[in-house]
Amino acid sequence: MPVITVSRQYASGGSNIAKLVAKRLGWTLVDNEFVDRVAGQAGLSRKEVEEREERVPGLAERLARALAISSPEVFVATGEPPEPQFGSEADLVRATEAVINQAVQQEERLIMVGRGAQAHLAQHEDTLHVFVVAPRELRVRAAADRLGVSAKEAEDCVDKTDEGRRRYVKANYHRRWDNPTNYHLVLNTGVFSYEQCADLIVEAARARGWV
């Protein structure tokens, strides 16, 4: 089943673009926050699910239940909502991959943002891997505005976040996160607007025969 993965430099607008594409195509959006949440708490309480279900109605609860049943070595299913218990990053990576795998199995058409999905699904058929970039100075300004911090603090945030993503993919998948050959589309929001980038992704999906 078709999957679009969106990787992005920090503050380049990749998450916003993914939301636009999901809305236009009517596909399910699984973003970075969503994966972290389900990976961290298989067997979410109904209250927790309902509080954070705006973007993906019903999917979090279904994934949590399926993961607790199908991956007991990764998730502990109890009568109470468990707290995240990961002994190492390797445990977190396994949990994250379990969420990604389960989402791919349960949903017909997916857009996945972040968490190394492009690397984990590198050999998966029917994928479109997108990398969103922008000039550093533009991203620093965007980060400063978004976070309400100084330019220096924004620079540090941009660099540290990008380095963390680079390290995560290299350490766990032995791939270069920012290598353009690992992607089908590389989009620069310093040149194209978010709307135009969404248009290009939709056209690429149409070219693959998914629309």
Image (cartoon, helix red, strand yellow):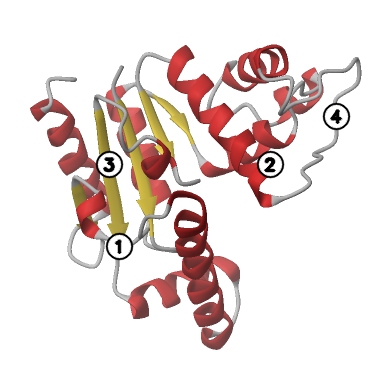
Left or right of 36, for residue 88: right
Question: Would you identify the image quadrant in which residue 153 lies?
Answer: bottom right
Q: Earlier in the sequence, mark 2 or mark 1?
A: 2
Disc 3 target residue: 129
Q: Amino acid at mark 2?
A: Asp
Looking at the picture, how far across and down is residue 150, in whole percent?
A: 57, 84
Disc 2 target residue: 91
Alpha-carbon span between mark 1 and mark 4: 37 Å
User: In front of the other: label 2 or label 1?
Assistant: 2
Residue 61, above or below 51: above
> Quick check: marks 1 and 4 in contact, CB under 8 Å?
no
Residue located at (81% from left, 40% from top): 85
Q: Earlier in the sequence, mark 4 or mark 3?
A: 4
Residue located at (38% from left, 25% from top): 110
User: In front of the other: label 2 or label 4?
Assistant: 2
Q: Earlier in the sequence, mark 2 or mark 4?
A: 4
Alpha-carbon span between mark 1 and mark 3: 13 Å
Camera-nearest residue between 60 and 105: 105
Q: Is residue 188 visible?
A: no
Q: Residues within 10 Å of mark 4 (few under 14, many from 20)?
A: some
Q: Say which element carries label 2.
A: helix
Looking at the picture, how far across and down is residue 24, in whole percent?
A: 28, 28
Q: Say which element carries label 1.
A: strand
Q: Say which element carries label 4.
A: loop
> Quick check: marks 3 and 2 in contact, CB under 8 Å?
no
Left or right of 3, for residue 207: left
Disc 4 target residue: 82
Q: Amino acid at mark 4?
A: Pro
